[in-house]
Amino acid sequence: MYLKRLEVYGFKSFANKTEMSFEEGVTAVVGPNGSGKSNISDAIKWVLGEQSVKSLRGSKMEDVIFSGTSSRKPLGIAEVSLTLDNSSQALPVAYEEVTITRRMYRSGESEYYLNKSSCRLKDIRELFMDTGIGKEGYSVIGQGKIDEILSSKSEDRRQLFEEAAGIVKYKHRKHEAQKK
Ligand code: ATP
Ligand code: MG
């Protein structure tokens, strides 16, 4: 499984609809300072359901929507779609490609889609559980994250190992069953 495509519109500095295709094995994005490299990793975190404004380097969630420039009006919507190659069936769905989309208006509500069908954030969370990809995963390791992992409480650090071991799904199901 690998990141195949990222489509960004209205997200941070991406005022124009921008499509990025990644071949298997791409390991780096390079560019001048301020050109939008970190905005790409922010877009990946955001579409995976990131709710922490701080982790997205903003002060309010609206900050992810293109805020305009001297020559261009602000936009009212941000939309990011992330496509993964699932030909290895690493994700437990019968699609060769899995695309998740998040759209947000200035009013604040986010909409999520899985292969163009409307879904809940919960569905996306469950799909990526134990894959290391989701919001709680380790597919995006931001600056300072390694220090945070090393200095965190053992119970918090355990979560990372549980995700890697692939048992989060079962713990989650047990928890859901106990609620009923
Ligand atoms: P560096 O090499 O310094 O880390 P970078 O390539 O990671 O740079 P980013 O942090 O991704 O750069 O992009 C910063 C740019 O994104 C800034 O010019 C900033 O004004 C712009 N930007 C961030 N949020 C928005 C927004 N909501 N609307 C418009 N532009 C934005
Ligand atoms: Mg950066």
Image (cartoon, rainbow, N blue to C red):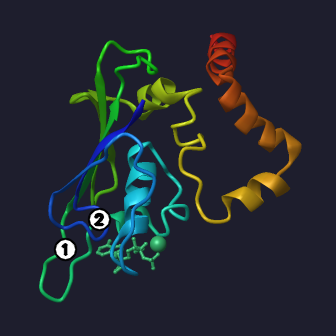
Query: Residue at position x 21%, y 30% from top?
Result: 116
Q: Position of residue 172 (x, y in %)?
A: 64, 21
Compared with 27, 36 (above or below) is below
Determine whether the residue tagged by mark 1 lies in a helix, strand or loop: loop
Observer-nearest of 55 and 76: 55
Mark 1 touching mark 2, by CB under 8 A? yes
Name the residue type under label 2. Answer: Ile
Q: Within 8 Å: ligand 1 and the Cβ of disc 2?
A: yes
Residue at the far bottom in the pictured view: 70
Side of 62 where 28 appears, left or right: right
Dot 2: within a 10 Å radius of its alpha carbon, few (fewer than 14), some, or many (20 or more) residues?
A: many
Observer-nearest of 5 and 128: 5
Q: Quadrant of the C terminus?
A: top right
Query: Residue at position x 35%, y 70% from top?
Result: 36
Q: Position of residue 125 (x, y in %)?
A: 49, 31
Side of 122 where 13 appears, left or right: left
Residue designated by label 2: 65
Compared with 172, 14 (above or below) is below
Find residue 74 and name its label. Answer: 1
Query: Residue at position x 50%, y 69% from top?
Result: 57
